[in-house]
Image (cartoon, rainbow, N blue to C red):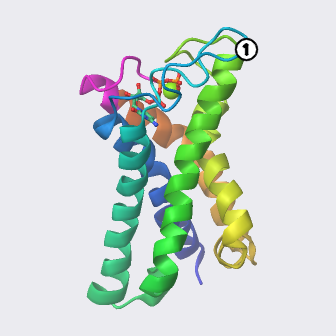
Amino acid sequence: MGIVTILGQALWFILPALAPSSGAVLTGGGTPIDFGKVAKDGRPILGPGKTWRGLIGGTLTGMALGAIFNFLALNVLDKPEWSFGEWGDAIPLLFFLAFGSMIGDLLGSFLKRRLGKEKGSKFPIMDQYDLLIGSLIFILIFEFSWFESQYLAGDHIFGLIFIIVLIPILHRLTNIIGYKMGKKEVPW
Ligand code: CTP
Ligand code: MG
């Protein structure tokens, strides 16, 4: 497999883990996940920016994007190597990618609150990598063989390095778009 294909697949397979935060911005609102409760330190557990609707909407956004990719790979392009597998394998894999990403986002906010950072404040590294970290935790536990073959084996490791470099750039771009759309209060 050529290096361009490896890098292309690395990005393609991670997009269902990156899309959920945009999905959460678009679908979020309503009851906060922490129900407005504060932790022992007197600060919100997660804060008002983390809602049930965002959690569910974000997870479904990532899964829907992955399902479109899977349909394209299996049924339109007839390129199974670009698929997440047969549907019975693909659906749980997409769930772990997307839901894990949203859990990473919650973990990021939880840590921000513990550090006394307000909703929307900057938290370098975690702001950019919380989604990937959350997804990786779930994927390493539940989908290790998939992860190994797509991101570790042989030259696939260059795909993993590529997405680690690309994520801060994509993160910045999508947040600027969200800000311009009036969906995000801050462009980061
Ligand atoms: N959002 C949501 N539910 C989630 C995640 C996000 O409703 N589980 C929505 C909220 O409207 C939130 C917006 O998406 O304000 C942007 O998400 P994010 O940047 O992750 O949150 P912040 O507002 O920056 O809050 P935090 O400081 O906790 O990251
Ligand atoms: Mg944020």
Q: Residue at x 29, y 26 (%)?
A: 183
Q: Where 98 sits versus 154, above or below?
A: above
Q: Residue at x 61, y 43 (%)?
A: 104
Image-based side of 29 in relation to 140, left or right: left
Answer whether residue 96 is magenta in the image. no
The part of the image, by quadrant, that contains residue 175 is top left
Q: Where 144 sits versus 45, above or below?
A: below
The magenta span reads 177-188
Q: Amino acid at mark 1?
A: Lys
161 or 34: nearer the viewer:
34
Q: Position of residue 172 (x, y in %)?
A: 47, 32
Predominant SS along the magenta part: loop
How many numbered marks have been drawn onto this rendered protein structure? Answer: 1
Q: Where 114 sits versus 74, above or below?
A: above
Q: Where 14 sits versus 54, above or below?
A: below
Q: Which residue is under mark 1?
A: 40
Image-based side of 59 in relation to 161, left or right: left
Callout 1 secondary element = loop
45 or 114: nearer the viewer:
45
Q: Position of residue 141 (x, y in %)?
A: 73, 65
Q: Residue at x 66, y 72 (%)?
A: 143
